[in-house]
Structure formats: C-alpha cells, structure tokens
Image (cartoon, helix red, strand yellow):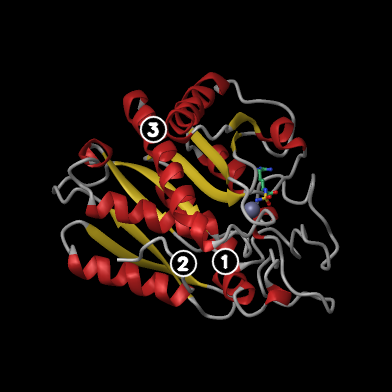
Amino acid sequence: RLGNERYYSHEEINQFIEDLARKYPQRVFLKTVGRSYENRWLKTVTITNGDARRNKNVILVDGGFHAREWISPATAIYLINQLVENLEDNADLLQDFDWVILPVVNPDGYEYTQLSADTRMWRKTRKPSSSDCIGTDPNRNFDFHWNEEGASDDPCSNTYAGAKAFSEPEALVVGDLIHSYADRGQMYLTLHSYGSLILYPWGWTAAVPDTEEDLKEVAEAGQSAILDATGTIYKVGPSTTTINYAASGASDDYAFNAGFPISFTMELPFGGTGFDPPASDIDRIVKETWVGIAAMARRVIQKY
Ligand code: 0X9
Ligand code: ZN
C-alpha cells in the first residue's frame, strides 16, 4: 500500500496497482492500455465490488496529464486505496458502478520532472517535435475542436497542440478509453492542479451545454462536501469563464462530447509555489479531494 508521506515514481505506482490486483483478484483488474513515447506502460485499474455483474455503469478517472502536477497521481493513488481497502464504507460507490482509473497519463513527463530542480516544472509529454523543442500538451491534443482556441502551433509553447490531433500516444490512449466506456460511462473526472476548481464543459467555448444544471448539481455536491470537511473553498463553473481562458482539444470536452453526461476537470489546491505542494501537504490534500470525489460520485449514482 502506498501511503501519503511522499510522491512516488511511475514504476512504484505501476508496481502498486499490480500488487493490488494480485491481492484482490476478484475485485481489482489491471489492463495495459498502451505505452508512452518512451515505452512506459499505461495501465488502468478497474475496481469492482466483486459481484458477477458485468457492464455496470462506469466512473472514469485519470491523473498525471501534466507532468509537474504531482498531487494529481497522488490523489489517484489515494482514490484507488480507498475504493479497494475500505470497501465497507464505500460499498454504495461500487454497488452499481465500476471505477476505471489511469493514475499517470503522461509518465514520461512525470519522470522527467523528478530528475532535477531544473526539470521540475515540465508540463508536456516528451516526444520530440519537428523543431528543437520537445513535447506536446496532452490536454490540447484531443480530436475535438483541436487547435482552435487556447492552444499553440509553436512546438516550443507549453500549450503546443501537437502536429495533429492524437499525435501523442498518451492522449490517444485516453481517447480510446473514453470511447470504450462511453456507452456506460456516467462520469469522467480528470485530475489537474492548481486552483481549487471544479470545471465543467465547455472549455473550448464560453457557451454552456443545455444540461448545465446536472453538471452544476454534481459539482456543487463535491464543492460543499469539501467545504464542510476542511473549509477549503472550491469554485464551480463552466471551464472557459471560470478558469478564464478557452482551451480546445482537452480531454474533458472530448469525454462530454463522446457521451459522458458528467465530465469535470478538477484543479486541486495550490501548494508550495503552486504546482509543487511539499510532501507534508499530500495527506491533507488527497483526503480532502477524496471527500469531494466521493460526494460527486454519490450524486451521480443517485441521478443515473
Ligand atoms: O489548461 C489546462 O489544460 C487545464 N489547466 S492546467 O493549469 N492544469 O493546465 C484546464 C483545462 C480545462 N478544460 C478545458 N479547457 N477544456
Ligand atoms: Zn493540468
């Protein structure tokens, strides 16, 4: 079991989910869904309550899109621990739903940020581009309004959209996952930092979907659960006007468009200089975030 006392390498995280699947063969299933540019395995963990029912509704969660946002994989690990090791308290979350979690979407970038202080603030993937600059923003690389807004054609930009939609193997893996669960997926949640925000579509335009009330209701359930638990104030709203920029080609819009009725980007709280909460903050942040995620999931389960 991985505790909250430090940040872990991608290898440790993969080892952890492998051990978990071995320990709970009836309830935890691992699937290798692809590999990163530098050939790191991307593995999803599917968590069930172990009953024989197939094709339940699905909650799909990912973390580690952006390399430097370490609190995101840390939160995914805690979420996995809670759902697996604390089944008694969370039986309702697994009664009619399976959870599919990809803790580190961009492991090449994540590992790169662990190398040195100089590389700590890397954001993108690590695949070379046509220029001398390396990497694409995986959250601008999805094939939905690709490279229209808040994304760059410049390979040296931190928001480089890539040479074409799904040019990055890591983004393509998430796109495929979204499609493979779209028919029974009720919530897609992508964990980023920072800002203490729960953002719902759209992120590519300031327009809002006509199901905004549903999105708001679920997001506000998370917001108020976190406020009650710790006093942390989250802001809830449509992505473009809440984070104050449009950005197209992101995974949240892609999942919503593909059929997930609820789709959120959660920007976890600030820590350290922003993207780098010290290890001593991990426990507090991941526990608080878990409270919010569980509350949102419970609301989704009531609704769908
Ligand atoms: O810009 C992003 O990719 C996200 N913020 S971050 O600081 N973690 O990089 C926000 C994405 C919001 N969603 C859309 N614009 N679709
Ligand atoms: Zn991010």
Which residue, given by chain and number where applicable, does mark 2 sit on?
A: 6
For image coordinates 52% across by 38% down, the residue present is 263
For image coordinates 57% across by 75% down, the residue present is 111
Q: Is residue 211 left or right of residue 247?
A: left
Cα–Cα gap, marks 1 and 3: 27 Å
Tell me the crowding category of disc 3: few under 14, some 14 to 19, or many 20 or more residues within 10 angstroms, Cα based.
many
Which residue, given by chain and number where applicable, does mark 1 sit on?
A: 106
Q: Earlier in the sequence, mark 2 or mark 3?
A: 2
Q: Nearer the viewer, mark 1 or mark 2?
A: 2
Q: Secondary structure at mark 1?
A: loop
Which residue, given by chain and number where applicable, does mark 3 sit on?
A: 295
Q: Earlier in the sequence, mark 1 or mark 2?
A: 2
Mark 1 residue's CB less than 8 Å from ligand 2? no
Q: Is residue 98 visible?
A: yes
Tell me the crowding category of disc 1: few under 14, some 14 to 19, or many 20 or more residues within 10 angstroms, Cα based.
many
Which quadrant of the figure has residue 211? top right
Tell me the crowding category of disc 2: few under 14, some 14 to 19, or many 20 or more residues within 10 angstroms, Cα based.
some
Looking at the picture, tell me which residue is in the foreground, 28 or 270. Answer: 270
Position of residue 277 measured from the top left corner of the image (x, y, whole percent): 59, 57
For image coordinates 28% across by 53% down, the residue present is 47
Q: Secondary structure at mark 2?
A: loop
Q: Callout 2, which amino acid? A: Arg
Q: Secondary structure at mark 3?
A: helix
Q: Nearer the viewer, mark 1 or mark 3?
A: 3
